[in-house]
Amino acid sequence: MMKRRQVVEQLLANRDGLLVVAGLGSTAWDITAAGDHDLSFPMWGAMGQAAMMGLGLALAQPKRRVLVITGDGEMLMGLGSLATIGVQKPANLSVVVIDNERYGETGMQATHTASGIDLSGVARSCGFNIFSLEEAQEAIHRRAGPNFAAIKVVAEKIPLVLPPREGALLKARFRRALLGKDADAI
Amino acid sequence: MWPEGIHRELVAAGVRLVGYVPDAGHKRLIEMCQADKSMRAVVLSTEEEGIGLAAGAWLGGEKAVLLMQSSGVGNVINVLGMVKECRFPLVTLVTMRGQEGEFNPWQVPMGQATRAVLEAMGTIVQVPGNENEITPTVNAALRLAYNSYASVAVLIPQRIIGIKSFQDQTSR
């Protein structure tokens, strides 16, 4: 089985103009380990909202590609958002769940996926196209979405690699990198 | 009528996304937003999703407004923490239940707590006193939110909406 940091590094290779949202916890540290970036929005809270942040961003920026990277516990808390996204059908959005079957930040307790709950099956039922890690580059950058992958990874405790913590900073740097001068206009 | 007035304000403010969980009091406004090609109405599984939607839209340079009933305010409490910490501008239009003349006792606890929980999470609450004040209150809320990076909720009182019974609600 793959290690989570290797998977995320692979997802973010050649990221070009990709807009990235990472869910609360390990996936926010993973995208930072792969290289902190102004067009990454790592979430330090609002558990369950990563996919919806991705939807809002994808609808606001239909010409850009948007990637949400989140954990199985975070996705389970926002399972209804898969149905919401399935209704809107954003062609430029991909959601990847890094599935270690654990709540990694709170003591590695088992999530529902450890008991066989199939997130890809839920996403497929909600109208997502399912892709594999081998197809990831093509799917994330070119395939008409919404696209979804749940990638099983080793449950391991690894060193934290923390992004900036201040929410207003993370928001402002993202908007300036994306919108330029317009970010500060009224 | 006030739904038309609110819709005009949303158009004038350049709102492109309207996230909603259906409510009888918002029925007319939701229909107008759905019919308006300048905006996209996004039906949500739960009100909490609207916070993620609006935050993501703002990251991408667009304005979103949320429509919900007072019961839905209880579903967004924790994620309002992100709005405050990140200073995301947010406008939430809340149709009130559990106030004057409520016919469903299960609506009363959340209706009575709506203002307190919003304010506890750092959202500015504005309440129009009568029907004629709704449109100017929404106008002011939009300007306050987007000019000042504030979270603003407009609570539309139950006496203005005037739904008196289950039968009345389903017949609208």
Image (cartoon, coloured by chain):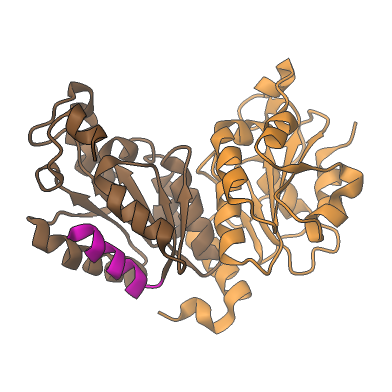
Chain colours: A orange, B brown
Q: Is residue A20 visible?
A: yes
Q: Is residue A92 above or below residue B161?
A: below
**Picture layout, residue A46 above or below residue B168:** below
For image coordinates 30% across by 47% down, the residue present is B27
For residue B5, side relative to residue B148 (left or right): left
What secondary structure predominates along the stretch shown in magenta?
Answer: helix
Q: Residue B104: percent from the left, percent from the top?
A: 18, 24
Tell me which residue sits at (19%, 29%) in the image. B167
Q: Position of residue A130 (x, y in %)?
A: 79, 41
Residue A89 magenta? no
Percent coordinates x, y for residue B7 in the rendering: 30, 64
Residue B143: give x, y in percent of width and height.
29, 71
Give the side of residue A10 with respect to residue A92, left or right.
right
- Tell me which corner region of the image, top left, top right, bottom left or bottom right, holds residue B166: top left
Is B124 on the left-hand or right-hand side of B15? left
Which residue is found at the position 47% from the left and 79% from the top? Answer: A184
Q: Residue at x 71, y 62 (%)?
A: A65
> For the magenta stretch, what is the residue range?
B1-14
Q: Is residue B116 above or below residue B3?
A: above
| Closest to the observer, A60 or A163 | A60
Question: B37 or A8: which is nearer to us?
Answer: B37
- The image quadrant where one finds the N terminus of chain A is top right
Q: Tell me the quarter of the picture where residue A93 sits.
A: bottom right
